[in-house]
Image: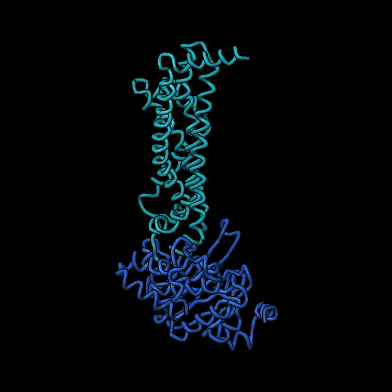
Amino acid sequence: MQEFFATLWRDFHTAFIEDNRWKYIVEGIQNTLILTFFALVLGVVLGVIIAAVRSTYDQQYERMTGPAKPFLAVGNWICKVYLTVIRGTPSMVQILIIFFIIMASSNNKMLCGIIAFGINSAAYVAEIIRGGIMSVDPGQNEAGRSLGLGYVQTMWFIVIPQAFKSILPALANEFIVLLKETAIAGYVGVTDLTRGANIIRGVTYQSFWPLLAVAGVYLIMVMFFSWLVGILERRLKKSER
Amino acid sequence: MSDNIIQVNGLKKHYNGGEIRALDGVEIGIKRGEVVVIVGPSGSGKSTLLRSLNLLETPTEGAIIFDGVDINDKKVNINLHRQRMGMVFQHFNLFPHKTILQNMTLAPLKLKKMPKAEAEAKALELLKRVGLEDRANAYPSQLSGGQKQRVAIVRALCMDPDVMLFDEPTSALDPEMVGEVLDVMKDLARGGMTMVVVTHEMGFAREVGSRVVFMDEGRILEEGSPDEVFGNPKCDRLKEFLAKVL
């Protein structure tokens, strides 16, 4: 028994303490968080644009006149294709395509990762936002318009603030999903958390500690962010009353 | 015809390429200061007609001439005309994330660029008229249905509309709250407001209406003073309808 623990400790020592290998894990956590954060920022920016085009098309297209009309139709079509392609292919394949084909000339692996995950996330974020906007009672839009407010004013002052309540928690969840998804960034050379573990594995010929440690770190991060989302949800509920 | 603030000509609203005809050639003129009450069975097109008057419903064809301008013309900026037509909905449609005062001042602040103090003073005065000045800083969810509808009415009045449109304003209310809303509407009518009201409250139609319009299957079948329509109905559909509701 004693021997077992001794071996365990020796392996632990080799995995993390020898040659300061724990630094791979710390760097991995850093990179994973940076990657997730900026990918989500990109995802939200693109997602908002796509959601704006899609919901404007749904609600306004029939009543529209003037030169903007064909542009909106084309824009909506592009967005639809985008959503179909991104949601219909594995993110693993998408990141490989971005890295080896579209951005093959770039050496910045992190940037490639951010762009790949951002583009992927945007598709989901767009539908979260559109769903949030559609969940607001159409009567709210009618009330705003009946007072003489324009479409954009009604969206801005009346619909979007209400949509926000259902969007924000779902968006926070998307962040958590994205955090776990970034584990595949190692395939294109980003030294994220998972790759950190793999590097240690390669050097020490040990799997036990690096992989369990990484799983634990992911779990702790996810639990922490879920806890934050929970607080957020309760806050939003409170303001309803 | 020129003293009509609203003149509707040949108004049609078709769905599925004419298969369903919500409105099938409606002609109606509304004079300034008139209270026109539209009655009829459900699905008769009365709500569609009312909602077409401020283009919340886009007609398939026809003209809606509001104060001399055909607002069904696509070149017209409908937002400017809507500012002059207040609308009250069956489900109140107050903005739940804003206080009563904010609900009322939003449009005057954004559209009329009214100074905040002025807009709020005006809103408070209107709230006083409907006995709700002490609820100015409450949120809609803290109000009863009757109170919500009274707020919805004064919210529309904040824009100083020329016409008020009411889409079944008491249908979603508990019975004991109907009276308080109707009282506000009667008050408004006595003050000379031009009103178009879709309602099932025949008592209100009889007491306040200057004209009652009976609709069925997307057409106006009969119209006249309340005494004529209720006392001496001519067409069979109206007789049948009145037998059921009175």
- Above or below, B14 relative to B168: above
Left or right of A71: which side holds A231?
right
Q: Position of residue B22 (x, y in %)?
A: 57, 65
The answer to which image quadrant residue B204 occupies is: bottom right
- Colour option used: by chain
Q: Position of residue A49 (x, y in %)?
A: 40, 43
Residue B7: tell me if it is visible.
Answer: no
Q: Position of residue B58 (x, y in %)?
A: 48, 62
- Above or below, B77 relative to B197: above
Marker count (numbered): 0
The answer to which image quadrant residue B145 occupies is: bottom right
- In the picture, the quarter occupied by the C terminus of chain B is bottom right
B117 or A237: nearer the viewer: A237
Left or right of B224: which side holds B100?
left
Q: Residue at x 39, y 34 (%)?
A: A38
Q: Position of residue A42 (x, y in %)?
A: 39, 37
- In the picture, the quarter occupied by the N terminus of chain B is bottom left
Q: Residue at x 40, y 27 (%)?
A: A31
A143 or A161: nearer the viewer: A161
- Above or below, B152 relative to A39: below
Q: Which chain is blue?
A: B
Residue B186: tell me if it is visible.
Answer: yes
Q: Residue at x 46, y 20 (%)?
A: A195
Q: Which chain is cyan?
A: A
